[in-house]
Image (tube, grey):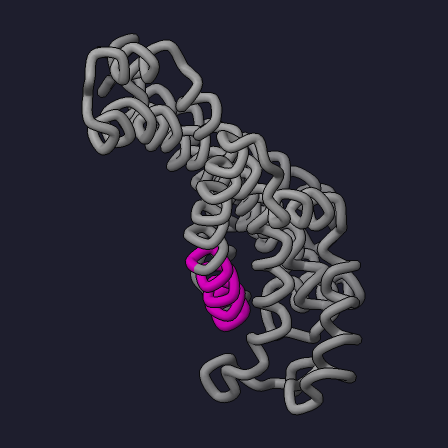
Amino acid sequence: MRNEILRRVGISLLIVIAVSIVVFAPTLLLPDAPGRMDESPVSQYFGWLAGLLDGKLLGAHVINTLVLLVAAVIIATPLGVLIGIASARRRLRRQKHRLHWLSLVLTALPEFIVGLALLGIYAIVVLPILPAVSAPKTQVWESPIQLMLPLATLVLVATPYVVRTTRSALVEALDSASVEMARLKGVPENQVVTGHVLPHTIGPVAKAIAVQLTWLISGVVIIEYLFQYPGIGQALVAAVTQRDVPVVQAIALLVVVACVVVHLLAQLVDVAASPRLRRTHA
């Protein structure tokens, strides 16, 4: 299993390096290319990379976006898992859970539509005390209430996919031959769940969370711009408008690295939790 983990980490590093080179290459064609003309492309690449990673370009914006994404994942993950479990139990009783149908509808809606709906319903009709957009040049910790609408949008977008994946994984595991055999042998239901059901559901749920988090990372640009939230999304729109190439490159590289790391963690969780993968890579 250790070799498999090292292999996947190595592949992820190669992907990040390859993408960083692709992002850097066009800067060599610019009139004001980074570095001196007498430097080799390799030296210019490492100088460019050090300039992007020093934290001066996007420090505050990255922190604000991380606060928003982490809060959304902390809320959406357990909520989606619990609703998925409830939906799976109804499935075993041959009933359709109402939340199952709601998750289908929310899965089909783009985050921009969900954000607009919340903007109209909560900020204007139901709870006008919530700010529709963030105040200019205001940090999250100075006005935490500005998190409410962007956070609610991301939670509504992220939860349905986790619900559907959890439900499907649980139903498949509960209907599997190993679970049926364990029940025929008289194994207590708690041991059946912990020993046979959960190990086969952790991997798919982790992958679902990774996929959804990747979507959130890409979709947060739209949400932050919609609510004028001071994160990397708003910084990206401003950088594109002002043709600020270093900021655009830094955000592009940051998004790719975040997506690669998220998927790598999901793969490692899948390898560690799945009995089949542990036996294969033992």
Q: Which residues are magenta?
A: 59-74
> Horizontal and vertical percent for residue 63?
46, 68
Q: Check the picture and name the quadrant holding the N terminus.
A: top left
**Which quarter of the figure is the C terminus placed in?**
top left
Most extreme residue toward the bottom is 129
> Is residue 267 part of the magenta span, yes or no?
no
- Residue drawn at 57 percent across, 75 percent down: 148
User: Which is more toward the observer, 271 or 248?
Assistant: 271
Q: Is residue 163 left or right of residue 109?
A: left
Front-lying residue, 124 or 8? 124
| Left or right placement of residue 111 versus residue 181 in this view | right
Tally of numbered tags: 0
x and y, in percent, of residue 79 in the image: 47, 54
Looking at the picture, tell me which residue is in the foreground, 56 or 226: 226
64 part of magenta stretch? yes
Give the residue drawn at x 65%, y 38%.
Answer: 25
Q: Is residue 36 visible?
A: no
Whether residue 86 is situated above or below residue 195 in the rendered picture: below
For image coordinates 42% across by 58% down, the residue present is 74
In this orientation, does residue 60 appear? yes
Q: Residue at x 68, y 61 (%)?
A: 236
- Give the dominant element type of the magenta stretch: helix, strand or loop: helix
Q: Position of residue 47 (x, y in %)?
A: 48, 49
> Is 233 situated left or right of 46 in this image?
right
The relative height of residue 144 versus residue 220 in the rendered view (above or below) is below
